[in-house]
Image: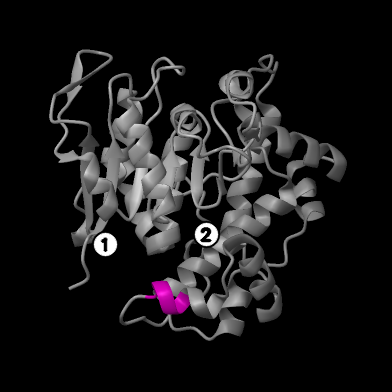
Amino acid sequence: MKPAYRVALVAFPGIRAFDVSVITEVWGTDRTDRGVPAFDLRRVAVDDTAIPMRGGLALLPDRPLTWLARADLVLVPGLDDHLTPAPAPVLDALRHAHTRGTTMAALCGGAFTLAQAGLLDGRRAITHWNLVDLLRTHHPRVTVVPDALFIEDDDIWTAAGTAAGIDLCLHLVRRSHGAEAAAAIARSMVTAPFRTGSQAQFIEHPTPHTDRDADALAAVREHALRHLHEPLTVADLAARAGMSPRSFARHFTAATGATPLRWLLDQRVAAAQKLLERTDLPMPEVARRAGFGSEVTMRQHFATRLATSPRAYRTAFSASAAVPAPAPAADSVSGGSSPIAR
């Protein structure tokens, strides 16, 4: 039996209860009966003293900092006060974990903790859009990317504010265990397996006078998800929304944080991932059903977005006994960001 994937939640006074809850929900719930791999989540701290959190909550550590040497993934929650200094032993342990090559990830203001440890010096990072300037001011050696949902540099991941921590955790599951495992967790959490775009879509803007355009765009996205196997173009989607291509692209990007073409390609990649995991269809048929048109095109987009090939992805993440795929009905190739539970 494959050993459980070991995840360390680094805890110290000042961490945010929400981020702790996100980490615990994604990595600390047994979903092996749904095909999700076994995870071993541990709460790692300087000692076993209960750690108070906002709202009258407390976290009980169950492993010392030395357990980081055994972890496959180290997760750092955000902070209530983003300039809270982490204990020196915690910073030392984080540095040692990175030196060993352990994957590390910080949610929201957890980027400040990694920056305190010097792990983000000369690297790209992101935090909540309202904290970007603060991170730049206090840690000028960090290359702050202002509008990503999450970002990676040298196997160190950082995420934007609050809900982006969910996006990052699900992405890390997808990266290590496949799209189907991430989708199963997302379904149980009643959230999208992934969101495309940037956090620019969440920065405060004046409230629009009408939801007509938003409703039209939502209908177009739903239509696209149900017809990914067809040769959709941005012009086709704009016509369906009753807009000119230029106006459609502007409204779409403002609403989602991604251009229509980028969003459509992301959905096609997600559809191909599902087919590769769930079926034994030949590569040309997977490419056709996901809407790529050819295996060569699908391979190019896998290399760009996933840094792997479709064949390597299938080898790593396919079910032990793939089943023949049904005909390409609407839901069989729907992209990962559809909010409809399946």
- Picture residue at 32% right of the left edge, 19% below the top: 14
Q: Which residue is situated farthest in the bottom direction here? A: 282
- Picture residue at 61% right of the left edge, 68% below the top: 302
| 331 or 159: nearer the viewer | 159
At mark 2, the secondary structure is loop
Q: Amino acid at mark 2?
A: Ser
The residue indicated by pointer 1 is 37
| 65 or 339: nearer the viewer | 65
Labelled disc at residue 19: none
The residue indicated by pointer 2 is 334
Q: Amino acid at mark 1?
A: Pro
**Magenta segment boundaries in residue numbering:** 314-318
Q: What kind of secondary structure does the magenta stretch mostly adopt?
A: helix
Q: Quadrant of residue 23?
A: top left
Q: Give whichever of discs 2 and 1 has the lower sequence position.
A: 1
- Picture residue at 37% right of the left edge, 46% below the top: 96
Residue 88 % position (x, y): 34, 28
Residue 80 % position (x, y): 39, 17
315 inside magenta stretch:
yes
Residue 188 % position (x, y): 30, 47
**Against 269, is 336 above or below?**
above
Screen quadrant of the N terminus: bottom left
* C-alpha separation, residue under disc 2 versus residue under disc 1: 23 Å
Residue 59 % position (x, y): 19, 27
